Image (cartoon, helix red, strand yellow):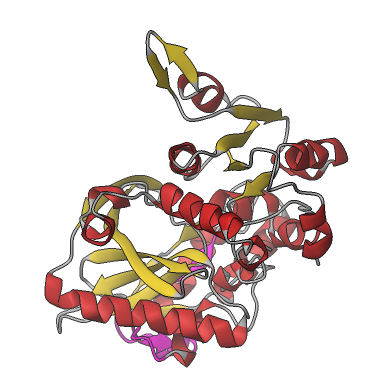
Amino acid sequence: MIDVKNLLSSYNFKVLPVSIGSLASHSMLDIARGAKDEGFRSLTLCKKGREQTYDKYFKTRTRGKENIGCIDESIVLNDWKEIIKEDILKKLIKFNTIIIPHRSLEVYLGYDIIENSLKVLLFGNRQLLRAEERTGPYKIEKNQDYLVRLANIPTPKKFTTPNEIDRPAIVKATKAIGERHFSREFPIVNSLEEYEEKCKEVVRRGKTEEERKAIEDNFRFAPIEEYIRGEKINLNFFYSKIYDELELLGTDTRLQFPNGEELAHIPLSLRESLLEKALEMGKKMVEITKKIFPPGIIGPFALQTIADENENLLVYDVSFRIPGSPDTEITPYTKYLYGHPVSFGRRIAKEIKDAILLSRIEEVVS
């Protein structure tokens, strides 16, 4: 458990400039641009061999009469987990750094490190991040499925065991091995027989007996739910702890590589009559996390939904951190609210700025 009070005493929010940053992946550029737009410094932690995007092409610099780029400071690591080395943590605190959690931070560091060893201020509720996991070694009982069910948010039909499969169903497994062992893959099966065949297929990926066992355990303990043939819509929210308000920042959908990995994001806008349903689901998720993981959601989160034939939006996945949706500012919702487009990165930075100005920073970090 991180001692947040002790961490706060190491920061100087009155004199020194504050840096906002994260790992150089996922939505780092969104985070950095938003930080810069709100007057903060931006800092990124890059893995060696993957640093040029941040350390060169998007580095802040003067070109002619223009200031361009959005990355002020880059720290290059040989391995992501070097972030918890004493000298790196000291450097982060020296730069008054607030880390923004994203999916890559969860995947490459793991929750044990995030919760116990990443001794730097984190925007949001770090104890809530683990609730995303429904399978694998980090699975907890009060995970996203538990929260969605308790909040009475509509979802596709769940199957308790593979014996119950009587229609197209998704096995919500993760890869279990390799650097991207957290990455999700959702094979579709139509019966118990297909379930068993798919299990054998994925188990063959393991190179050792230990890996094969990990893959099989992961697959067999994965949740199974009905496959809905409909459009996928991501509802990307922000809950302001400072102002106690829920905001819909944008909606989008995704393109994927043939192997299921994310390829691209496509902005879209909902039919206006569906906004009430969307906001009600977001509100329910905020309220249930306040009860189960106090103080609950702080800042960004997303509900991934599928649209069924009855014009319902059914939640099939939840993100308790900034979603990988850098195109939300292209959708109209923040312009309706603020009068101009606001990205996730900028909305996070605005919340941090207001928390500092109001001397309430301890309410939005953990």
At horizontal 27% and vertical 49% (from top left) the residue drawn is: 341
> Does residue 137 show up magenta in the picture?
no
Specify the farthest residue to the right: 86
> Does residue 156 show up magenta in the picture?
yes
User: Where, by quadrant of the figure, is residue 22 drawn?
Assistant: top right
In this view of the protein, which residue sits in the foreground, 126 or 12?
A: 12
Asked whether, in this view, residue 150 is left or right of residue 88, the answer is: left
At horizontal 69% and vertical 63% (from top left) the residue drawn is: 366
Asked whether, in this view, residue 224 is left or right of residue 331, the answer is: right
Which span is picked out in magenta?
A: 152-174
| Residue 84 in the image, given as x and y percentages of width and height | 79, 45
At horizontal 64% and vertical 61% (from top left) the residue drawn is: 359
| Residue 183 in the image, given as x and y percentages of width and height | 53, 55
In the image, residue 243 above or below residue 259:
below
| Residue 304 in the image, given as x and y percentages of width and height | 36, 68
In this view of the protein, which residue sits in the foreground, 123 or 113?
A: 123
In this view of the protein, which residue sits in the foreground, 22 or 152?
A: 22
Specify the farthest residue to the top: 64
| Residue 31 in the image, given as x and y percentages of width and height | 48, 44
In the image, residue 60 above or below residue 144:
above
At horizontal 50% and vertical 22% (from top left) the residue drawn is: 60
User: Where, by quadrant of the figure, is residue 364 drawn?
Assistant: bottom right
In the image, residue 16 above or below residue 192:
above
* Residue 204 visible in the displayed image: no
Query: Quarter holding the N terminus?
Result: bottom right
* Residue 297 visible in the displayed image: yes
Asked whether, in this view, residue 71 is left or right of residue 262, the answer is: right
The number of callouts visible is: 0
